[in-house]
Image (spheres, rainbow, N blue to C red):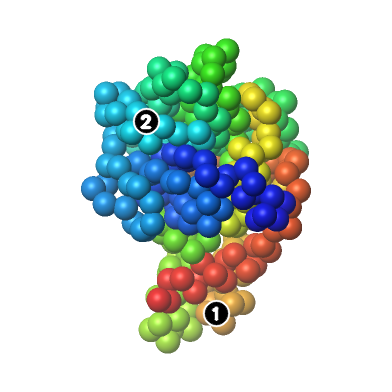
């Protein structure tokens, strides 16, 4: 869908973005501004990472505060991006992850339910909710079988949304898979590896040592810029309570990301598997069936852009 068609929907709308200082929001918010929306963002930090919209420091665990913000911005549309988003750290902070993601989602829906106008909301869930389903692509119709605390929290967020499904909140669920690009935190695998290669490049080294977990796992990666387009399309076009995988539909082995970076940089990686980086209940094949067809950025371009972002 061209920007002109998107603008016909988003222009003049009041849009609330939770997790406004997060990775996806750094791309979503500028796009919404260009489309003519009046954007309001909330996050935990005192100040916004980017400018040009109305930012509010707000903890979604504080129900009174989120009600105040919603009363001030009076949203037509909501992108609920905020959550604790690391599978790895969810094992260390299991209950904190589950409690934070579910309670914040309940507070948001409850505050919107108390609000006197109909809203349309995109809830960002995860493909992790499917759990292991073998060597095939996950379908939206598959049963939920979350196998880690992060996935449990995302499945719970979906259930909370369904509990508000008979009122004036019109919601769509996006089950997102891995997405990356410039701005991705180095706490995530592909960004941490790209950063190490960038550091080696800047120091004119011909080799880089990598301590990794299981790099034979297959994952579904999208460019964050493509994910933003899909989120915009879903909130614009999808019907109430519909669920969509947001993914590429293409599996890539994690070690191939390392090989890609070796080709880009002409730097050789020496790889050591570190036992502490191996995850419990790890899913060897994690790929979604892609039903949202758009022209996408090739993963090789995404990885190159990610690498170059660490050179700056």
Mark sitting on residue 265: 1
Residue underneath mark 2: 70
Q: How crowded is mark 1: few (under 14 residues within 10 Å), some or many (20 or more)?
A: some
Q: SS of the residue at dot 1?
A: helix
Mark sitting on residue 75: none
The picture places residue 14, in percent across and down from the top left corner, at 47, 40
Q: Quadrant of residue 43?
A: top left
Mark 2 or 1: in front is: 2
Q: Quadrant of residue 223?
A: bottom right
Q: Can you say whether 209 is above or below 64 in the image?
A: below
The picture places residue 12, in percent across and down from the top left corner, at 52, 44
Whether residue 301 sits left or right of residue 185 in the image: it is right
Q: Is residue 19 visible?
A: no
Q: How crowded is mark 2: few (under 14 residues within 10 Å), some or many (20 or more)?
A: some
Question: Looking at the image, which residue is at 55% across and 30% down?
Answer: 120
The picture places residue 294, in percent across and down from the top left corner, at 73, 52
What is the distance, in whole Å, between disc 2 and disc 1 at their CAs? 47 Å
Question: Looking at the image, which residue is at 30% across and 42% down?
Answer: 56
Whichever of callouts 2 and 1 sits on the residue coming sooner in the sequence is 2
Q: Which residue is at the far left?
A: 46
Q: Which residue is at the far bottom?
A: 204
Q: Is residue 169 visible?
A: yes
Q: Where's the C terminus, which quadrant?
A: bottom left
């Amino acid at each position: 869908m061209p920007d002109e068609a998107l603008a016909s929907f988003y222009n003049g709308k009041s849009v609330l973005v939770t997790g406004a200082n997060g990775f996806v929001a750094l791309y979503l918010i500028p796009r919404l501004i260009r489309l003519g929306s009046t954007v309001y963002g909330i996050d935990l930090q005192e100040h916004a990472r980017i400018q040009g919209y109305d930012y509010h420091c707000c903890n979604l665990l504080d129900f009174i505060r989120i009600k105040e913000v919603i009363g001030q911005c009076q949203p037509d549309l909501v992108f609920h991006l905020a959550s604790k988003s690391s599978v790895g750290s969810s094992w260390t902070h299991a209950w904190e992850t589950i409690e934070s993601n579910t309670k914040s989602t309940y507070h948001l829906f409850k505050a919107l339910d108390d609000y006197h106008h109909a809203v349309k909301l995109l809830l960002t869930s995860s493909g992790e909710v499917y759990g292991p389903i073998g060597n095939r692509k996950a379908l939206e119709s598959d049963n939920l079988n979350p196998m880690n605390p992060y996935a449990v929290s995302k499945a719970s967020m979906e259930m909370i949304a369904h509990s508000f499904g008979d009122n004036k909140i019109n919601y769509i669920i996006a089950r997102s898979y891995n997405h990356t690009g410039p701005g991705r935190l180095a706490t995530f695998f592909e960004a941490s590896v790209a950063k190490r290669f960038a550091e080696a490049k800047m120091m004119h080294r011909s080799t880089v040592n990598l301590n990794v977990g299981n790099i034979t796992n297959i994952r579904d990666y999208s460019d964050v810029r493509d994910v933003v387009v899909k989120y915009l399309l879903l909130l614009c076009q999808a019907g109430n309570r519909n669920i969509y995988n947001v993914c590429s539909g293409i599996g890539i082995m994690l070690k191939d990301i390392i090989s890609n970076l070796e080709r880009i940089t002409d730097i050789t990686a020496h790889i050591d598997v570190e036992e502490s980086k191996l995850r419990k209940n790890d899913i060897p094949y994690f790929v979604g069936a892609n039903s949202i067809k758009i022209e996408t950025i090739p993963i090789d371009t995404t990885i190159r852009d990610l690498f170059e972002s660490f050179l700056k």
